[in-house]
Amino acid sequence: MALNYIWLALFFLGVLVGVVKACMGDLEALPAMMDSTFQMSRDGFEMCLGLTGTLAFWMGLLKVGEDSGLVNKLASFLSPVLTRLFPEIPRGHPALGSIFMNISANMLGLDNAATPMGLKAMQQLQSINTQRDTASNSMIMFLTLNTSGITIIPVSIMAYRAKAGAADPTDVFIPLLLTSMFSTIVGLIVVSIYQRINLFNRYILLMFAVIGAFVAGLFTLFMGLDSEDMQKFSRLLTSIMILGAILIFLFAGMKKKLNVYNSFIEGAKGGFDVAVSIIPYVIAIYVAVGVFRASGGMIMLQENVALLVEAMGLNSDFVSALPVALMKPLSGPGARGMMLSNFDQFGPDSFIGHLSSVLQGCTDTTFYILAVYFGSVGIKKYRYSVPCGLSADLAGIIAAIFISYFFFG
């Protein structure tokens, strides 16, 4: 229901701003909005079409993992920890393995692998959901951890900074790591309060300790590398992770003496069905965001925030980067476009360029993920998932601003 109101608000606010501008003599506002509806509809469809191959491949691979028993073994191994965060999921359920793989892929910046794994996890969570049209507690916890966007290796952002001519494309590594961890922790705490989960359980604390040790080790390793070597190592590590996962699934199927090819094809067919099913949800989000942007609503919001900040006697330098933060929960490509625009206008090594980079990676596309993941399994009642996701977004934005002032201000 909350997403419905937000979607309508974006659309009608965009129309209102466009009509007001037209009445004031800006006759290009309404045609621009009209063009945007067609353009964003096409972009949404093309995005889903482009995602089809990736979904088919990874969901085929996950099917091999399920049939070989690999996912069940992973789920059993992780049960002591994940069942504390997801108490509704039975021990050893395959959803635990898919959740772990999705979160791991997000942490390592493997976007192409993360989405199929996330959609697979939602299908498995739906299989144990007693209310088919209502989000379960486990779904909300999973979505919040997903949308909070913790990223250890921000490969794509470093690549965009390098392409824009940044002197040191990797200098946002530490700020991005800190901000994304902060948003994830806040999101986890908020959901745990709603669901009355005790985060001081020894298994959960052990999980945080292992993640912390891994991050510290990676941080120590990266700090010994120069900018170029760090980028090469990041790309190499990403490639090793993806190829390693593929080989492990295939070898597991061969060891089980499966017909790996048939198992893969069966799963890949499901990937195609999922890609088709999410098209309406993606187009709905894209069109609303496009109308709001084309009307000039985003620029007006930015200008008013700047006036408010200055009226409070605060430094408003960060406001020019806010469109990235405001767009990120709604549209990943939209936020990326804002970031690249700031690179062109201010330079990638400016304060705005650095802050835009950190804002781009501090959280994920909350409303897009909610619409696509819930839409893929027919969930219509989101319960408290929107405030939990937005709390993580807000925490990430605030942390990004303060941390960027500390590192780059």
Image (tube, helix red, strand yellow):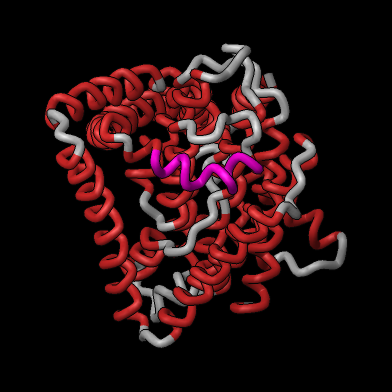
Query: Residue at the location (59% across, 78% down)?
Result: 408
**Residue 183 appears left or right of 60:** right
Q: Which residues are magenta?
A: 73-84
Main secondary structure along the magenta-highlighted residues: helix
Vertical position of residue 91 compared to residue 362: above or below: above
Q: Quadrant of residue 232?
A: bottom left
Quarter residue 223 falls in:
bottom left
Q: Residue at x 39, y 41 (%)?
A: 73
Looking at this view, name the residue that lies furthest to the right.
Answer: 312
Whether residue 397 appears in magenta in the rendering, the answer is no
User: On screen, 299 above or below 6?
Assistant: below
For the question of whether residue 24 can be seen, the reply is no
x and y percentages locating residue 180 in the rendered image: 58, 58
Where does the C terminus fall, quadrant-wise? bottom right
State the image coordinates of residue 197 (x, y, percent, origin top left).
75, 41
Quarter the N terminus occupies: top right
Confirm whether residue 220 shows in the render. Answer: yes
Residue at position x 57%, y 33% in the image: 367
Q: As displayed, is residue 266 above or below residue 50?
A: above
Residue 78 on the magenta span: yes
Total number of numbered labels?
Answer: 0
Viewer-proximal residue, 10 or 394?
Answer: 394
Q: Nearer the viewer, residue 188 or 231?
A: 188
Q: Identify which residue is drawn at 65% across, 42% down.
A: 84
Coordinates of residue 252 in the picture (x, y in percent): 23, 43
The image quadrant that residue 262 belongs to is: top left
